[in-house]
Image (spheres, rainbow, N blue to C red):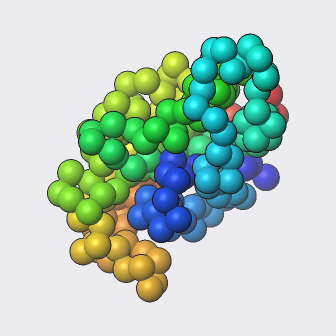
């Protein structure tokens, strides 16, 4: 069975993006999903000097192994001042040192949410433009605006049916992309 790694690019213990990620992961029907929280893979700020002195942190090597074993990805990224989070950028800096195209040309869906009306869309625009540098094959993005109005944290689901359809369509695109690839992983 195909495996999707669902990655939360937040280091908040109460991340709204992780909540959206859990909802999206629950929509996957034809693959196993493993949710990864970057708080479990915290490492020092990337530095060429640190890499030269100490090599790659064990946690980065473990995460890289999970990436290699996966067939596709859902990446949830909060937007901090219009950009990706420092923890996601730092993780990418370390992973790209192991393999610049660490996502292995595998299908990748991007999602984001925020308390405001932009829903993290600026951050998604940036990720869409640079994802190919990491070896991600972009299949689509989804942005949920006004998280606290549009997401039921008791039920852990998007409230609005039209928004549910949009995120289900994105998950469907990811699953369709998984079907077109062979079962082997690099």
Tell me residue 134's x, y (percent).
Answer: 56, 24
Q: Quadrant of residue 34?
A: bottom right
Tell me residue 56's x, y (percent).
Answer: 76, 26
Tell me residue 74's x, y (percent).
Answer: 54, 48
Tell me residue 173's x, y (percent).
Answer: 49, 46
* Residue for point 77% across, 17% down: 53
Residue lying farthest bottom? 154
- The front one of 40 and 171 is 40
Q: Let me know if residue 135 appears in the view.
A: no
Residue lying farthest left? 117
Q: Is residue 64 above or below residue 173?
A: above
* Residue for point 68% across, 46% down: 41
Side of 70 relative to 147 (left or right): right
Q: Is residue 185 above or below residue 173?
A: above
- The front one of 50 and 12 is 50
Q: Let me know if residue 94 appears in the view.
A: yes
Q: How many marks?
A: 0
* Residue for point 71% across, 19% down: 51
Q: Is residue 75 above or below residue 117?
A: above
Give the quarter of the figure containing the C terminus: top right
* Residue for point 52% across, 53% down: 11
């Amino acid at each position: 069975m195909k495996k999707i790694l669902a990655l939360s690019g937040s280091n908040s213990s109460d991340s709204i993006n992780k909540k959206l990620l859990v909802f999206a992961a629950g929509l996957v029907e034809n693959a196993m999903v493993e949710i990864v929280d970057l708080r479990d893979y915290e490492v020092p700020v990337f530095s060429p000097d640190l890499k030269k002195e100490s090599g790659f942190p064990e946690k980065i090597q473990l995460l890289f192994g999970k990436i290699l074993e996966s067939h596709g990805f859902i990446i949830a990224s909060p937007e901090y001042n219009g950009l990706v989070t420092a923890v996601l950028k730092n993780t990418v800096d370390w992973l790209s040192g192991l393999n610049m195209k660490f996502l292995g040309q595998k299908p990748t869906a991007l999602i984001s949410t925020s308390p405001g009306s932009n829903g993290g869309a600026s951050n998604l625009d940036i990720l869409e433009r640079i994802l190919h540098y990491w070896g991600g094959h972009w299949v689509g993005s989804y942005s949920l605006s006004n998280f606290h109005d549009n997401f039921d944290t008791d039920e852990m689901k998007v409230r609005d049916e039209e928004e549910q359809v949009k995120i289900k369509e994105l998950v469907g695109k990811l699953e369709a992309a998984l079907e077109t690839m062979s079962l082997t992983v690099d």
